[in-house]
Amino acid sequence: MINLFKWLFIALFSILNLTSFAQDDQVIELFRQAKEYSENENYLKAIKTYQKALDLNVGKYNYALYLNMGCCYAALAEHHLAIEHFDMALLHNVDDYEAFTCRGNSNTFLGHYEKAIKDHKEAIRILENQAGEDLDIAYYNLGDCFRRWGKFDSAIVYYEESLEYEHKDVSTRMNIAFTYIEMQRYQLAEAHLLELIEEVPEISNNHNNLGFVYLQLGDLEKAEKYVLDAQKIEPENSWVYRNLGLIHKAKGEKKQACKQLDKALKLEFVKYWGTDYIQELLDYCNQPAE
């Protein structure tokens, strides 16, 4: 039942004020090299290259360099180091929303939700004062922080605020549906997912999530139909096999349920949200035969 995240580090690997680097060709070249490394997901080389640029002591560009180094650390899931670099970026520019957004995202990943909320609200304040164009992203990130914290009502409020600025954004609407599932408000989730499937039928997670919703509502025929639709779109989606396992369990088909569980585990499902349902299937499959 994985959802599509719009988990965006807004300034990721951008070259800020590139024309002003013309006074120092060496810094320009290092910045370009680092950008190329990061685009190829070679984040460690990117970090080393940004550090070389910092070592040239062109101080007025430190904000951009620290910010992008922090984004590289975040991409490596080294969020403590990312935050250290975002802190350094903010020492050089306390009025730019991007560093607050990036630091807020890393704080969310670390479970530092109160700090994350403070960062995202500061980003929103700056954007509102500057009539910024990224308020949809800022409100989305705030909503996502509340959702991960388990404060679902607040998450819905801020997701909907995001939609005020980007009315038809798919990932925001997917996360609203996902949040309603977590709240066990399945009819609301159903309505959102049916609308999304009509508009963007190629996204497997919407079909899969809707199948899970129908499973919870007791409509096993519809549940299986939508999960199998998701499987056709994305055969390697581990959530599909977990949901198929749950459907077969509900139908009393133990052999099939355990077969689907095995597929989900081989796809390393346990790394993601929803392991309680995996445990439910494990307990079911480990029961001795009657």
Image (tube, rainbow, N blue to C red):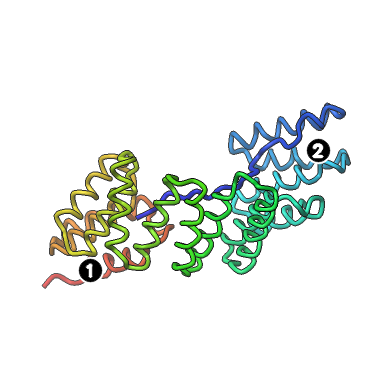
- The residue closer to the viewer here, 118 or 46, is 118
Residue 53 badge: 2
Establish if 224 lies above or below 218: above
- Residue type at the position of mark 2: Ala
Residue 88 badge: none
Q: How far apart are marks 2 and 1 (CA)?
A: 57 Å
The percent position of residue 265, horizontal first and vertical second, equals 34, 55
Q: State the residue at coordinates (82%, 31%).
A: 21
Q: Would you say 217 lies left or right of 160 here?
A: left
Establish if 32 lies above or below 125: above
Quadrant showing the N terminus: bottom left
Quadrant showing the C terminus: bottom left
Q: State the residue at coordinates (42%, 55%).
A: 175
Q: Mark 1 points at which residue?
A: 284
Q: What element carries label 2?
A: helix
- Residue type at the position of mark 1: Tyr
Q: Would you say 25 lies left or right of 179 here?
A: right
Sequence-wise first label, 2 or 1: 2
